Image: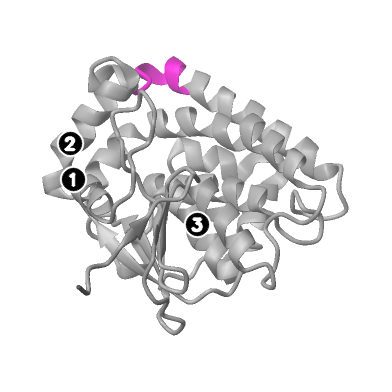
Amino acid sequence: TGELKTVRSSAKGRKRDAARPNMSQPIILYDIAMAGGTPADKAWSPNSLKTRLALNFKGLAHKTQWLNFIDVAPTLSGLGLAPHVTNDPRKWTVPAIYDPKTQTTIMGSQEIATYLEEQYPEQPSLFPPRTRALQAAFYDEVSESLIVPIFTSLLYRHLEKCATRDKEYFRSSREAIFGCSFEDIAPKGEDALKTRLAEIEVVLGKAARWIDMGPGIFVGGEGPLNADFNLVAMFLWAKMVGGDEHPVTRDILRADGGRWVRYIEAFDAWTALH
């Protein structure tokens, strides 16, 4: 009949189509575009940055399908992806990828990293042997701990950079996530902002101590791991949204004698947009 049959795998956030694979087409990365600016300024989703870095690190050809916030759910559900099982009102989120080689669609930065490692083991490794437990602990203790203080401190900068048609969705969805009015999400006043900055400083100290246990500038020592891409995505996100002079970005860049500036620069080879 020519009808495309779909086979759902048991893996979270993954769909595989039982059609003949296309070996020549690039992987499609679904991402949210920042409004305005230059093409190089489009990528601002921290979770999508993790996937973009991983794809570039592994040398995998890919191209970006840019979306608005309000287009994410209909686009990804239209690809056959099951929604996240979560209390978060956002049931479909970026990043997502479609790999024509395997006819597989996957949603979620960590799920994508695992898939890329399994499917392309001959490429540079995101999870070298005996590092998964370390990386999981680092992710929970460091990368995840930066999200709320960075996001809430840059809340209004995020709103400014949303496309006009996304602004109301951005406000209402964040109110649902935090369970309060939009105005109550951001720190109010200088003292409240200082509290957020202090939270970030504590996490940066943890990250530095973890990295200093090894032989190089990365969590992985001389070369980056998936955990490094998760961390640097937080820094790139802050720079993209806040600019270098916002207190959040400024404190990150000045911390520990500028070590995070050098850390960010070490990833320049893997930040290209496609």
Q: Earlier in the sequence, mark 2 or mark 3?
A: 3
Q: Earlier in the sequence, mark 1 or mark 3?
A: 3
- Res 181 seen here: yes
Most distant residue in the left direction? 165
Q: Which of 149 and 5 is in front in this view?
A: 5
Q: How far apart are marks 1 and 3 (CA)?
A: 21 Å
Q: Which quadrant holds residue 65?
A: bottom left
**Relative side of 234 to 167, left or right:** right
Kindly identify the residue that appears in the image at 30 percent across and 34 percent down. Answer: 90
Q: Earlier in the sequence, mark 1 or mark 2?
A: 1
Indicate the position of residue 226 as horizontal and vertical percent values.
64, 52
Name the residue beneath numbered marker 1: 70
Disc 1 is placed on an element classified as helix
Disc 2 is placed on an element classified as helix
Q: Which amino acid does label 2 sit on?
A: Tyr
Dot label at residue 51 = 3
Residue 74 higher or lower than 55, as above or below: above
Residue contact between numbered discs 2 and 3, judged by CB atoms under 8 Å: no
Name the residue beneath numbered marker 2: 169
Kindly identify the residue that appears in the image at 49 percent across and 49 percent down. Answer: 109
Q: Is residue 155 magenta?
A: no
- Res 244 seen here: no
Q: What stretch is highlighted in magenta?
A: 186-193
